[in-house]
Image (tube, rainbow, N blue to C red):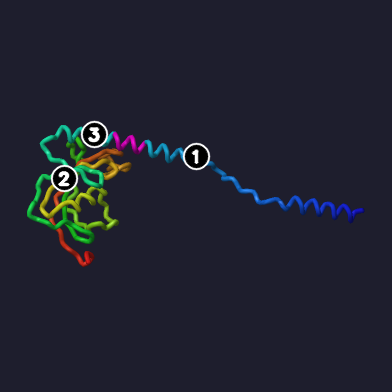
Amino acid sequence: MSRNIFIALSIIIALLSCKSPEARRPVQNNSGSFISKSIERNKTIFEKEELQITQLLDSNKDQAYHSSESGFWYYYNIKDTLQTKMPVFGDYITFSYDVKKLNGKTVLSEQEIGIQNCIVDKTNQELISGIRDGLKLMKQGETITFLFPSYKAFGYYGIDNKLGTNVPVQCTVTLNTINQTNENY
């Protein structure tokens, strides 16, 4: 009798253990709402900044503003029509710039920043992306004023005790020299 019970239990256990595997459910269920909220917040910030920049462009009709493919606006303070060479990847350049709010209030002066030396498109340099892109539009000796939305400037971080978060800025940049290096080849 105990043998029959043992065989019956073995058959029942074998049948129950042949169940197909069941998928595990995640411990946390994220709906993606954080990403959606972040996208909406960034769109709102961009629209607000674009409105501020557009108002500045409209109020300053005496300047011939250009729009860049990188998402900023600029005008020439000093334009050199004789030079043809523009900085390319690997060129060693020297330049100076300042940072102002759109209302013209100085955040960082050219004297505070000093003369900057860099190699074009080197990622380890602490330049805002707007200036990196803007320098490639310049010729030696030119001075250009750029209007950068915050995502091309100091963005979410700002500048400690000088510039808040998500503030569009204007930078006046003078490209002093362009020297070709061996990295160009």
Please state the horizontal and vertical placement of residue 3, each as a whole percent of the image. 89, 56
Q: Is residue 171 or residue 74 the one in the foreground? A: 74
Question: Relative to 135, is 166 above or below?
Answer: above
Task: Indicate which disc residue 172 carries.
Answer: 2
Question: Relative to 15, is 165 above or below?
Answer: above
* Residue type at tag 2: Thr
Task: Indicate which disc residue 52 carries.
Answer: 3
- Labels 3 and 2: the sequence-earlier one: 3
Please state the horizontal and vertical placement of residue 5, each as a whole percent of the image. 87, 52
Residue furthest left in the image = 82
Residue range corresponding to the magenta coloring: 41-47
Alpha carbon distance from label 3 to label 2: 18 Å
Question: Magenta segment: does it hold 46?
Answer: yes
Is 60 situated left or right of 27 in this image?
A: left
* Residue type at tag 1: Ser
Looking at the rendered image, the disc whose residue lies closer to the viewer, 2 or 1, is: 1
Q: Residues within 10 Å of mark 2 (few under 14, many from 20)?
A: many
Q: Is residue 8 or residue 140 the one in the foreground? A: 8
Task: Indicate which disc residue 141 carries.
Answer: none
- Labels 1 and 3: the sequence-earlier one: 1
Please state the horizontal and vertical placement of residue 41, each as a whole percent of the image. 36, 36
Looking at the rendered image, the disc whose residue lies closer to the viewer, 3 or 2, is: 3
* Residue type at tag 3: Gln
Q: Which residue is mark 1?
A: 31
